[in-house]
Image: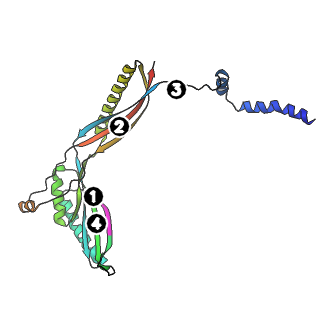
Amino acid sequence: MIRSQFRLLMPMAAAVALAGVSAPALAQSMSEPAGHHMVAPPHLSLAAYGEVKVAPDMATINFGVVTEAATAEAAMRQNAQSMERVMAALRRAGVAERDIQTSGLNLSAQYDYLPDQPPRLRGYQATNRVTVTVRDLERVGSTADAVVSAGVNQIDGISFGLTDRTAAEDQARRLAVRDLQRKAGLYAEALGVQLGGIRGLSEGTSMSVSPPMPYARSMAMESADASTSVSPGELTVRVDISGIYDLIR
């Protein structure tokens, strides 16, 4: 009796197993020989880039006011007074409030270290760092001089950029695609095949700028009441792309 039940259940198990297989998969398994795999159509993978030079239209100045005093309260108070004079100088230079940003505020204890003696507290140092955007490049040097005269005693440098990179990036994209198409056509001709449609395309953008220019104002400039000379130069906007083309034999 047990053997006859076992023989009846076997066809039902097979039917359940086949029910989980879709019709296309079943048809493929029936039509293709065992171990056969679909071969991907031939394709061509290439990379190209487009690059344009453009003049900057803005500059960024990173500077700070550093003060030291015997107490933390005195260091912060002196720093705040210096920063008030710096902000007033920026307003006189025509810098808008939206272009002035506090980038760091720090207070730290200062110690003297002597041989064979424990560290001795010398006082406290307060640092207030500010990032300023200057949109009139002709006023970059005079703006830097103005904040230094008002009390700034640290300037990290001056860097240049673009308010809007869209137009430059779009021009670089066109150049990149043109170069990619040229390469694809060249390879197809050399291989003796026809170039099919593009299967995929990816991109990456970048803008290379010169490192921040160090700020230096000589005594001769101060005596002659001349502003620091600043040269913005050019920026390089680059778009890198990679594409996959089908090849037709």
Give the residue type that dot 3 points to.
Answer: Ala
Give the residue type that dot 4 points to.
Answer: Asn
Q: Residues within 10 Å of mark 2 (few under 14, many from 20)?
A: some
Where disc 4 sits, the SS reads: strand
How far apart in space, not on screen, are marks 3 and 1 (Cα)? 54 Å
Identify the mark nearer the N-term, 3 or 1.
3
How far apart in space, not on screen, are marks 1 and 4 (Cα)? 10 Å
Q: Residues within 10 Å of mark 1 (few under 14, many from 20)?
A: some
Residue at label 2?
240
Residue at label 4?
128
Residue 34 percent across, percent down from the top left: 65, 25
Residues at discs 4 and 3 in contact (Cβ within 8 Å): no
Q: Which residues are magenta?
A: 97-106
232 displayed left or right of 74:
left
Where disc 3 sits, the SS reads: loop
How far apart in space, not on screen, are marks 1 and 2 (Cα)? 31 Å
Residues at discs 3 and 2 in contact (Cβ within 8 Å): no
Task: Give the residue at x 93% y 35%.
Answer: 1
Identify the mark nearer the N-term, 3 or 2.
3
Identify the mark nearer the N-term, 2 or 4.
4
Where disc 2 sits, the SS reads: strand
Q: Residues within 10 Å of mark 4 (few under 14, many from 20)?
A: many
Residue 117 sits in quarter:
bottom left
Q: Does 128 sit above or below residue 16?
A: below
Residue at label 1?
131
Colour style of the rendered protein structure: rainbow
